[in-house]
């Protein structure tokens, strides 16, 4: 009978000394082989990132975009559908957007384009900042104190469904200047989204944590800072993402009605001037800014809530 | 000097004729605890053993002060229990480690909040984590370690507060058989070292006898204390004792009592008939 190649005892030499030593050597070699194989399969960290970027994920995303633009092109340039002639084709938008001498005055080479963008970003950040600075503490207070909840929450719930644009007339009449009224209209929906999600966040914290904190001798302030605030964090960040989204919604509405600048104004002005490609440029720009700001919040959230991540690699 | 371990002289808990009824209206009223009387001697490990759903957790909540008995009274070292306090600590069935804190912070923060210097608290937390076999894990978050490890970290977090009475509500439930056995050994080592008066709740008879100085056996709902059995097995204990004749006798006695109760819990209709 021949020795079986898979028998670890058979991997060593034939003399007695070697044989007593061979199981360990086999084990060592086995570990090394495993690690080598793992290394080859997984590749380096950068290799994995590259694979993710050029791999199937990105390929499908690109495919989606291409299909979207093709459909847009077919609808506007190839088919002459009734009333669709108002919608600029992707070619017209792209030409205008990248022109050094744009027909309607807006392109990546005109300073005015960036002025509108900056004005809008500044308004959104200011409104978002105020909404969060006021909304998170209010939400925590509502979740923490029953009396305060009964006193305030019904009012919040009645005010919340009122569309921000309904506030425009009084905002313009009462607040000084265009800027403060646009910011006010922008922050309303964000504020309510933040308050509501923070409140839900506080409510989502299991009673066990409060009981444990109690047993461990946490004072009220420690319960607030060490249990309620971190415990509500996942919901708060969901709220912040929603808040950022609705900030952009309301901003554009406010700028259309009350603004003299900003992307909402750019779109409305383009409509009045029948500079239709500018509308699409404004829309795409808003889409990009909205996406980037939400992604930024997700990043910050993931970083602050590293404790949520599953897995053993600390 | 045979031993330096001294039995704690505090933590004596008396449960005196305690009854608890739940339900808001007369129709809904359900007697959960009918008449429970037993005591947890200072420095002892007393085990509350009963069929699932018999109101063991209710008793724990009453002793912890989360809820008040309908009748009867509970005292700790002579003082009546009326609200939660730092002299009693509960280790829950589900993990209540704060998921947003590292293990070290989870263990160390209690004493820091109650005024111990941070460095001293962290030092002791480190030592306790080492004692429960989590030496290399103190900077991990609870979600990054296994269920058994979470249970151990939680025991460490309870011990560091130096409570008079530790209430352990089926702390090893849900762990697989092997981990459960190892947890019991680890836990007993800790108990032998600290001798914190403990009321340990379980529905596992082997776990109960292996751990207990004293067994309090409960009936099914409405719950009464059926028997209190002293377990004269010496400490430190090991798994060989599970085959001793003392162990066998106690198990026989307890099983006989539990079987009838478990049957009632299993098929309440039949028991009523």
Image: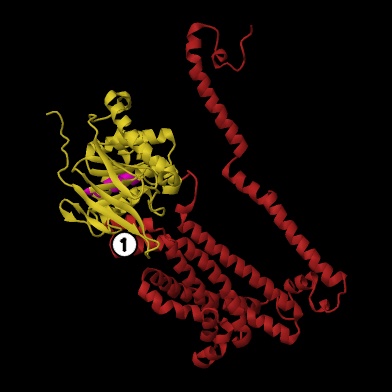
- Residue A266 in the image: above or below residue B156: below
Q: Which residue is mark 1?
A: A222
Helix, strand or loop under label 1: helix
In the picture, which chain is yellow? Answer: B
Q: Which chain is red?
A: A
Report the label total.
1
Q: Which of the image's four quarters has the N terminus of chain A?
A: top right
* Residue B159 falls inside the magenta stretch: yes
**Residue A187 x %, y %:** 52, 78
- Image coordinates of residue B92 in percent, x first then y, are 36, 49
Q: Residue at x 26, y 40 (%)?
A: B227
Splitting the image into 4 quarters, where does residue B64 fall? bottom left
Q: Position of residue B173 (x, y in %)?
A: 40, 42
Relative placement, left or right, of B103 versus A44 is: left
Is residue B218 shown in magenta?
no
Q: Which residues are magenta?
A: B154-164
Residue A294 vs residue B100, the one in the foreground = B100
Q: Quadrant of residue B234?
A: top left
Q: Chain of mark 1?
A: A
């Amino acid at each position: 009978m021949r020795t079986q190649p898979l028998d670890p005892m058979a991997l060593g030499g034939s003399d007695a000394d070697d044989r007593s030593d061979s199981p360990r050597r086999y084990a060592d070699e086995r570990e090394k082989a495993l690690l080598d194989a793992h290394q080859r399969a997984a590749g380096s960290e950068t290799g994995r990132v590259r694979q993710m970027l050029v791999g199937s994920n990105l390929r499908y995303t690109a495919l989606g975009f291409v299909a979207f633009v093709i459909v847009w092109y077919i609808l506007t340039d190839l088919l002459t559908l009734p009333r669709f002639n108002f919608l600029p084709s992707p070619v017209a938008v792209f030409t205008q957007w990248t022109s050094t001498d744009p027909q309607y005055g807006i392109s990546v080479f005109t300073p005015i384009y960036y002025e509108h963008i900056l004005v809008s970003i500044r308004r959104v950040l200011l409104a978002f900042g105020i909404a969060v600075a006021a909304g998170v503490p209010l939400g925590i207070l509502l979740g923490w104190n029953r009396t305060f909840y009964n006193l305030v929450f019904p009012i919040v719930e009645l005010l919340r469904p009122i569309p921000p644009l309904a506030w425009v007339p009084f905002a313009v009449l009462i607040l000084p200047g265009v800027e403060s009224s646009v910011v006010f209209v922008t922050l309303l929906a964000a504020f309510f989204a933040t308050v509501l999600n923070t409140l839900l966040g506080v409510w989502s914290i299991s009673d066990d944590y409060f009981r444990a904190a109690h047993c461990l001798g946490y004072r009220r302030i420690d319960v607030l800072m060490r249990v309620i605030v971190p415990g509500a964090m996942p919901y708060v960040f969901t709220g912040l993402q929603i808040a950022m989204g609705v900030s952009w919604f309301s901003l554009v509405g406010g700028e259309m009605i009350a603004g003299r600048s900003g992307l909402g104004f750019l779109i409305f002005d383009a409509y009045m001037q029948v500079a239709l490609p500018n509308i699409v440029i404004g829309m795409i720009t808003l889409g990009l800014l909205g996406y980037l700001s939400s992604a930024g919040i997700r990043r910050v959230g993931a970083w602050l809530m590293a404790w949520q991540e599953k897995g053993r690699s600390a | 000097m045979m031993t330096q371990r001294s039995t704690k002289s505090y933590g004596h808990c008396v449960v005196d004729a305690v009854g608890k009824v739940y339900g808001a209206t007369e129709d809904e009223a359900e007697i959960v605890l009918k008449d429970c009387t037993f005591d947890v001697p200072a420095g002892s490990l007393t085990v509350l053993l009963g069929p699932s759903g018999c109101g063991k957790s209710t008793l724990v909540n009453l002793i912890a002060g989360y809820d008040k008995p309908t009748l009867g009274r509970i005292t700790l070292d002579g003082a009546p229990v009326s609200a939660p306090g730092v002299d009693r600590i509960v280790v829950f069935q589900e993990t209540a480690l704060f998921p947003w804190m590292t293990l070290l912070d989870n263990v160390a923060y209690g004493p820091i909040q109650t005024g111990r210097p941070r460095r001293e608290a962290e030092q002791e937390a480190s030592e306790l984590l080492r004692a429960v076999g989590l030496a290399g894990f103190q900077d991990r978050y609870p979600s990054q370690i296994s269920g058994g490890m979470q249970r151990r970290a939680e025991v460490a977090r309870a011990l560091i507060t130096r409570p008079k009475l530790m209430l352990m509500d089926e702390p090893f439930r849900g762990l697989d058989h092997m981990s459960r056995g190892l947890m019991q050994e680890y836990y007993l080592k800790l108990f032998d070292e600290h001798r914190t008066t403990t009321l340990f709740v379980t529905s596992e008879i082997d776990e109960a006898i292996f751990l207990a100085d004293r067994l309090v056996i409960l009936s099914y709902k409405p719950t009464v204390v059926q028997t209190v059995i002293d377990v004269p097995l010496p400490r430190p204990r090991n798994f060989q004792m599970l085959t001793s004749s003392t162990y066998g006798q106690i198990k026989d006695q307890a099983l006989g009592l539990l079987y009838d109760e478990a049957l009632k819990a299993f098929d309440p209709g039949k028991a009523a008939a």
